Image (cartoon, helix red, strand yellow):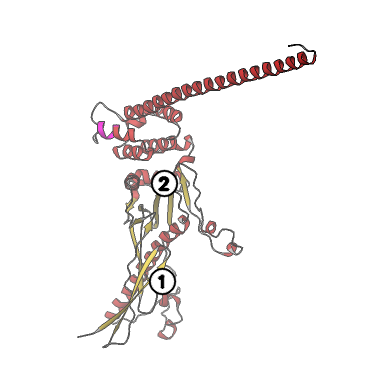
Amino acid sequence: MIQCKCSIELFEWGRFKILLMRKSSKQNETKEKSIVQSETFTDGKIGGLGSQKDALTALFLKDNRNFAEVFNHTILRDDPVNPEGLSTEDIRETATIRLTENGCITLTQYRDVVKCAKDGTSQLILGIENQTLDDFQMSFRVMARDFINYARQVRLVTDRHAKEAREKKGTGKSDQAENDAGMEITVASKAANGEYISRFYQTDQLSPCITLVIYWGKDSWSGPRSLSDMFRGNKWAVYAPDYAIYVLEVQKMTEEEILSYNDDLKMVFGCVRYSQHKKELERFLAENEDALERTSWTARNVMVEMMGSAKLKKLFLKNTSEDGKGDYTMVQALKEMLDDAITKGREEGREEGREEGREEGRREERKNTEREALRADKAERELAILRARMARHGLK
């Protein structure tokens, strides 16, 4: 029987918690192996488990057409991706990194949505992160997600070359690399050859990874837009490599931008954009009533959730169905919500007007009382003066 002793160390790297287990055996020489348990924390959420808004927006943007349009209208205007060429990737991204000769760590991160676009031999990894609140670590979070994707790609390449080397060895062939001229590299020169050591050849390549942050918040985005924003005035920051991120602020979208999208995205962006301005929302809905009726069930759910109206949510869930059948429409639900808000506003206005009238009456009453007091005081003073004069003349 082999007796083992283990020592466990816990250390943190950014948002990762890493559990490093060192194993030693009496039978063999001491070896280091890493067993890593990593967790991702995002606004109090573990492993990407989030709120209803997170789940609905992620589901909505998983649609290839919506996903492609968001990127094509923001980042990839000059070289758009084809929705039909998109494939869905696992939102759980894992990469193994070697720390010691015999030990490694495994890092895991979760994305809201991630897809892969292909065009010939070119491949592009695209990810979306939805935010409803400012995150002052956002540039680091995006960099960490992209880093793990690149680390996974590198690992896949090195594992492939290692497998090829083992297969060569198994068939009795010498494990030799070839240089650009096709010459075999001798065993003596292998140690000095970067390709052999890293298992990443000069002809190997990585696929670029682009992450877009969609900010649905009511206020302007005040989080960092690059890694350098987190250095906050450090005088040496200019020498450090920077990492910029892409942020789409829904509240800052122009109507021209909103109207350029398909019906689902147009109505979701528009309703969120104008949700704090009832008159503008009423106008936008009136001008795009047909587009609203063509929206999908998922898009309508996103609108209801992101607009934050309890009245609209109640009306929508009570009176609409997923198959779109029935006399009650999304337009009616939104109109009832707006009518309710307008009626409430008018009632509040009338009550405010009545209160102002009552306050004005109280102010006038106070003024009248003050005027009466002044008149009484003046009459009293005049009477006192008259009495003094009469006394001087011996009159009573």
Residue 130 position, x and y percent, is 39, 49
Three-letter code for the amino acid on which mark 2 is drawn: Thr
Graded by Cα atoms within 10 Å as few (under 14), some (14 to 19) or many (20 or more), the crowding at tag 2 reads: some
Q: Nearer the viewer, mark 1 or mark 2?
A: 2
Which image quarter holds the C terminus?
A: top right
Graded by Cα atoms within 10 Å as few (under 14), some (14 to 19) or many (20 or more), the crowding at tag 1 reads: some
Residue 94 position, x and y percent, is 34, 63
Q: Is residue 323 above or below residue 367?
A: below
Residue 85 is tagged as none
Q: Is residue 3 above or below residue 10?
A: below
Outermost left residue: 1
- Main structural element of the magenta stretch: helix, strand or loop? helix
State the extent of the magenta-drawn residues as a range.
315-320
Q: Nearer the viewer, residue 171 or 320?
A: 320
Three-letter code for the amino acid on which mark 1 is drawn: Phe
The residues tagged by marks 1 and 2 sit, at their Cα atoms, a distance apart of: 40 Å
Q: Where is mark 1, residue-wise?
A: 200
Q: Where is mark 2, residue-wise?
A: 132
Outermost top residue: 395
Task: Name the residue located 46 percent from the left edge and 81 percent from the top edge.
Answer: 192
Residue 121 sits in which quadrant?
bottom left
Task: Name the residue located 37 percent from the left edge and 40 percent from the top edge.
Answer: 306
Which image quarter holds the N terminus?
A: bottom left
The answer to if 317 sits in the magenta stretch is yes
Q: Nearer the viewer, residue 60 or 72?
A: 60
Residue 290 sits in which quadrant?
top left
Secondary structure under the numbered disc 1 in the rendered image: loop
Going by the image, does 14 lie left or right of 324? Answer: right
Task: Name the residue located 29 percent from the left edge and 37 percent from the top edge.
Answer: 297
